[in-house]
Amino acid sequence: MEKRFWEVFYDRDNSQFEVVRISQDDTHFTLRICDLQKAGKHVDCSTIPTNVSKEDIIADMNSQGYQHVDGLYERAIARLHTK
């Protein structure tokens, strides 16, 4: 059985995050986060097992003062490539 997990993106400067997608390989995702960090962005990522629901992840992060923003990851990547 292959492992599946949620990829979660965090923008630490703005206290925002996005539950991006379910994945089995986070290599590309992690490399993009590293690119953003090298460009000076205060971002981070994590993977969370899929037995935790997206709604539970969002509720937990909201309780920590983070706001869920759909499309946050893709916008960050797009800005990286336009500079």
Image (cartoon, rainbow, N blue to C red):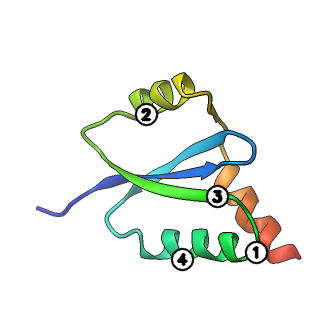
**Mark 3 = which residue?**
43
**What residue sits 51% from the left and 68% below the top?**
29
Amino acid type, residue under disc 3 in the picture: Val
- What distance separates the C-alpha of mark 3 from that of mark 2? 18 Å
**x and y percent of residue 48 in the render?**
35, 48
Amino acid type, residue under disc 2 in the picture: Ile
**Mark 4 = which residue?**
31
Amino acid type, residue under disc 1 in the picture: Ala
- The mark found on residue 57 in the picture is 2
**Above or below for 15 versus 34:** above
Helix, strand, or loop for circle 2? helix
Helix, strand, or loop for circle 1? loop
- What distance separates the C-alpha of mark 3 from that of mark 4? 12 Å
- What distance separates the C-alpha of mark 1 from that of mark 3? 10 Å
Observer-nearest residue: 51 or 40? 40
- Left or right: residue 4 compared with residue 8: left
**Mark earlier in primary sequence (3, 2):** 3
Instruction: Using the rendered view, name the quadrant where residue 68 is placed.
Output: top right
**x and y percent of residue 9 in the render?**
56, 53
Observer-nearest residue: 55 or 34? 34
